[in-house]
Structures are given as C-alpha cells and as structure tokens.
Amino acid sequence: QAQPVESGGGLVQPGGSLRLSCAASKLAEDSYGIEWSRQAPGKGREGISCIGITDGTTYYADSVKGRFTISRDNAQNTAFLQMNSLTPGDTAVYYCAMVPSRVCHVLGVPAYAEWGQGTQVTVSS
C-alpha cells in the first residue's frame, strides 16, 4: 500500500469544526479499513476512529465519540474525518492509514500500517 496523504488541518477556535481528508492510492480494498489516529505534543499516538471500506462500519474512541464523524468515498479513494465541537484537547497531528478490517475496532495504531505524514490541527482562541 502506498502512503496515504492527509489534508485539511489548520487553526480553529474552540467550538469550531474542521474536515480532514485522507487520500489513499486504492481505497476500495476488501478486508481493509481506514483508521485515523492523532498525537498531541508530549503524548503517545491515540487511535480515534476507523471505518470499514466495504461495509462502512464505524468505530470511535470515547474521546471523540459524538463529536467526530468518519466517512469514506470509495470512488474518490478518500476517507474523511468531520470534527465538530473542537476543544484545545484536540490539538494534535492527525494521521490516517489503511488497516486490516479485522483490527478496525481495536483502534490500536498498528505499527505495520503505512501511516501518512499527518496534518496539524490546532484548537486555540
């Protein structure tokens, strides 16, 4: 799998929204999912959401549940992460990767996956 490319990050005020995109070389792969993770300054990588490419089943970490929505457009080979009600605690570099669908629910940030370079999200007034 080629390295995916994340985009859409930026500076936003608390309570604001951003939509991240993850462009993959070939999104429509059976038995795969797209996982989003993030890494805040001084903290470890956190898996926050995953979507099955074939069936669209979604998973969320408690930290983002109810505020973030993951989706995918297989025709465009792109996955999205809509982030609403952002707080300073969401400030981080956000990454995406294709992962085996059988581990999508784990949100385990598998080291064997090909993660992108990331996109910076900063939530600040």
Image (cartoon, rainbow, N blue to C red):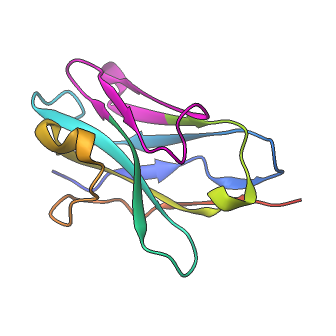
- Give residue 70's position: percent from left, percent from top: 45, 31
Using the image, determine if residue 123 lies above or below residue 70.
below
Residue at x 67% of width, y 60% of height:
89
Q: Quadrant of the C terminus?
A: bottom right
User: Left or right of 102: which side holds 8?
Assistant: right
User: Can residue 25 be seen by looking at this rendering?
Assistant: no
Q: Report the residue that reaches farthest toward the right.
A: 125
- In the rendered image, the vertical position of residue 115 relative to residue 8, given as above or below: below
- Which of 44/82 is in front? 44
Which contiguous range is marked in magenta? 51-80
Q: Is residue 67 positioned above or below 121 on the image? A: above
Determine whether 34 is above or below 46 in the image: above
Is 111 inside the magenta-drawn segment?
no
Q: Quadrant of residue 82?
A: top right
Q: Nearer the viewer, residue 19 or 69?
A: 69
* Image mark count: 0
**Residue 44 on image: x %, y %:** 43, 73
Quadrant housing residue 56: top left
Instruction: Give the residue drawn at x 48%, y 44%.
Output: 62
Is 68 a magenta residue? yes
